[in-house]
Every structure is written in C-alpha cells, then in structure tokens.
Amino acid sequence: MSELAFKTLGGEGEDIVLIHGFGSDRLSWLATSPALMAIGKVHALDLPGHGDSSPEIGDGTPHALAAQIAVVLRANGISRAHLVGHSLGGGLAMLMAANEPVRVISLSLIAPAGLGTGVDPEFLAAYPELIDADAAMTHLRRLVVLPLLINKMTVQRVLAQLSREGVREALTMIASQLVRGEASITCTPTAVAGCDLPRLVLWGDRDTLNPLDQHQLNTFGGTGLIVANTAHLPHIENPKLVNEALVSFISRARAL
C-alpha cells in the first residue's frame, strides 16, 4: 500500500480534510486552508502517486484510493471529519461517505468526478506525458479562465513532480482507472443522497474538463453554487467566494 504524505496545517475544533485533484498535490489548497483554519483543525494529504506520496498505487482504482485515504485518517487519529475534495478528490470523498457515512460530518465538493458529464479522458491521458514546458503550459491553462494563473513556476513544479521515479506510470494508471471507473463513482451520489449528510457542491460555470451535469446534481441534492467566470479550479480562480461558501457551509454543518 502507498505511503501517503499527510500534514496537519493548523486550527482547532472538528477535523477538516482537504483532498486534491488529479495531477495536483496538497499545496493546491494554499488559498483555501487559512480560511478553514478559523473554524476547524485542517489537514491535507497527497494522493498516491502525487506530491510527496509514494508512487505505489496498487490497482489505482478510485475505490482503492478512497480506501487508502480512510486508512491514513485512522492512522492519524481522525475518526470523523468534514471532507473537502476537488475533482478526483471530490469523487473519492463521495466514495468515502458512501462507504462509511458515520465517519463523515459533511461533504464539500468542487467539480467532483462522478457528478459531471465526465472528466475529459484526453486531458487525463496527456497529463502524465507532459515533458515540454510550452506544451505543458498550454495543457494546464485548460484548467482556468484566466491564463496568467498558470505561470512558469506552476509548469516547473508540475514537470518536476512528473520527473520523480514511477510518477508518470502511477498517474497513467490512475487516469486509466478513473476513466474506466467513473461510472462506479457516478452511482455514488444516489447512495450519498440517501444519507442524512450535509453536502455542498461548487462548480465553475466555464468548466470544460468536467462539465456540470445538472441532473446528477439534482439527484445528489444538498447545496449547489455555480461560480461565475471560473473553469475547473474555482477555489484558485475565485478563492474569496469559494472560501466564504465553504466556511459558511461547514460552520452550519458543525452546529448540527
């Protein structure tokens, strides 16, 4: 089993766990975590094959990744938590809630896999193959509306992560399994909707990598918020609005 990098960022109160998306790492929450530390004890992790975690991913399926996160939370003494997940991380958070709802206080999902029309398989397949900086810049700018949010430093970090031994292979497997297994995540919203679990979904209105499926969102229920003029990274493109929504929602869920 992969060893996951796990870090407690700070704050006091109920545990809040941040789960990033495909190809990213826990640093993607830099604009989010300070706001959440005002209302809870915030933790972030690197998924298998990402960031500082081991490239050993097992079979790389969404269910296997979700199970590994659950193991790490138990190992760090977290029995119940508010889960905040983006993209792949959002799909994994849904799976965790469906598998063990008693361990989840609330779900906050940003463009989650399994609730959209489907994560772009070409984007997923091409990501682990990125080598050239210019090509990587073009590829990564599909994530945002404002191109300047993806700069040379962003590209250098991505290429440095991809150069780690075993990472390209790990991400290729995860991408393949996500495309194959997204249908299984898509079944999860109905299961979660049957639980008495507070849930929030945020989505960029210009997301072309995992476009919103309104029917799925209606089935999922809870609170929905469309973030105007953002694409697949609304928590980075409009952190003020997203942070306000997260803090308000989690604070209410905490009070239940």
Image (cartoon, rainbow, N blue to C red):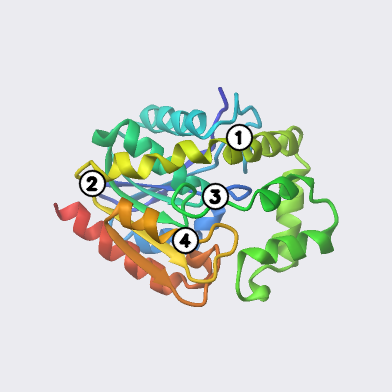
Residue 197 tag number: 2
Count numbered badges in the picture: 4
Q: Residues within 10 Å of mark 3 (few under 14, many from 20)?
A: many
Which of labels 3 and 2 is toward the front? 2
- Of labels 4 and 2, earlier in sequence is 2
Q: Residues within 10 Å of mark 1 (few under 14, many from 20)?
A: some
Q: Amino acid at mark 1?
A: Gln
Q: Residue visible at 34% across and 62% down?
A: 246
Q: Does the CB distance between marks 4 and 3 fall below 8 Å?
A: no
Instruction: Name the residue that disc number 4 marks.
Output: 212
Q: Amino acid at mark 3?
A: Gly
Q: CA distance from mark 3 to mark 1?
A: 14 Å
Q: For residue 255, what is the image quadrant?
A: bottom left
Q: Does the CB distance between marks 4 and 2 fall below 8 Å?
A: no
Residue 21 tag number: 3
Q: Does the CB distance between marks 1 and 2 fall below 8 Å?
A: no
At numbered mark 1, what does the secondary structure look like: helix, strand or loop?
helix
Q: CA distance from mark 1 to mark 4?
A: 21 Å
Q: CA distance from mark 4 to mark 3?
A: 16 Å
Q: CA distance from mark 1 to mark 2?
A: 28 Å
At numbered mark 2, what does the secondary structure look like: helix, strand or loop?
loop
Q: Residue visible at 56% across and 22% down?
A: 1
Q: Is residue 46 above or below residue 130?
A: above
Give left or right: position of 6 versus 106: right
- Of labels 3 and 2, earlier in sequence is 3
Q: For residue 147, what is the image quadrant?
A: bottom right
Q: For residue 132, what is the image quadrant?
A: bottom right
Give left or right: position of 25 versus 111: right
Instruction: Name the residue that disc number 1 marks.
Output: 177
Which of labels 4 and 2 is toward the front? 4
Q: Residues within 10 Å of mark 4 (few under 14, many from 20)?
A: many
